[in-house]
Amino acid sequence: MSSRLRLVPRSPGLYTLIVELCDRFSRVVGSLGVVELDKGLYVYVGSARGPGGLYARIRRHASREKRVRWHIDYITTWGSSRVLAAVYAVTSSDLEPRLARELEALGLEPAVRGFGCSDKPSFTHLFRCVEPLELCVDACVEAMRRLGLEPRAVALL
């Protein structure tokens, strides 16, 4: 895990994870049933409001060893996935649905209906990014800026 992770604040906030699938993914993902994803880059939208804030949540996602709790855990515990980066912003506002809409407006492709958003009115919180990693990070930064936030990016590998 990257030593740069220590720079992430322990404040509440909003984040995106950029995850690489190094092979085709096909697994049962909780109540969603079988989820199939092509190899490539994906962006996941989440929020951190619990103890340890952004630092604790992003650190958890970057770790492969954990109890599977959220949809994204099925991907991040899979041996052919790598959490490459996170883009985050400190906020106490519930902006996940708006961030998901901004990412789609910027051209990211909705990946799986209902993924990561069973408690939100969003179509999905998982998007396919067909651009190189740097442009995926740039899209996440721009989407957060459009919401009036001050995003920061951190490499996790």
Image: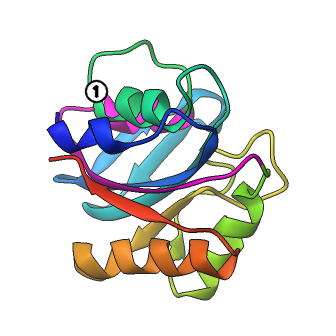
Q: Is residue 1 left or right of residue 128?
A: left
Residue that carries the numbered disc 1 in the rendered image: 63
Of residue 138 and residue 100, the one placed in the foreground of this image is 138
Foreground of the two, 74 or 155? 155
Dot 1: within a 10 Å radius of its alpha carbon, few (fewer than 14), some, or many (20 or more) residues?
some
| Tag 1: amino acid | Ser
Identify which residue is drawn at 80% across, 39% down. Answer: 119
- Tally the marks: 1
**Colour scheme of this structure image?**
rainbow
> Would residue 21 be found to the left or right of residue 109 on screen?
left
Viewport quadrant of the N terminus: top left
Which x, y percent locates residue 59? 36, 31
Outermost residue, bottom side: 106
Residue 81 at x, y = what percent? Answer: 23, 43
Would residue 119 be found to the left or right of residue 64 on screen?
right
> Which of the 4 image quadrants contains residue 39?
bottom left
Residue at the far right: name it: 121
Instruction: Say which residue appears at 59% left-offset and 71% top-offset.
Output: 144
Question: Which residue sits at x=14%, y=47%?
Answer: 157
117 relative to 133, above or below: above
Instruction: Look at the image and say whether residue 115 sits in the magenta stretch.
Output: no
Vertical placement of 17 versus 146: above or below? Answer: above
The secondary structure type at the circle numbered 1 is loop
| Magenta segment boundaries in residue numbering | 71-92
Name the one closer to the observer, 120 or 91: 91
Task: For residue 24, say whether it is visible.
Answer: yes
Q: In the rendered structure, does residue 82 fall within the stretch colored magenta?
A: yes
Where residue 74 sits, quadrant-wise, is top left
125 above or below 12? below
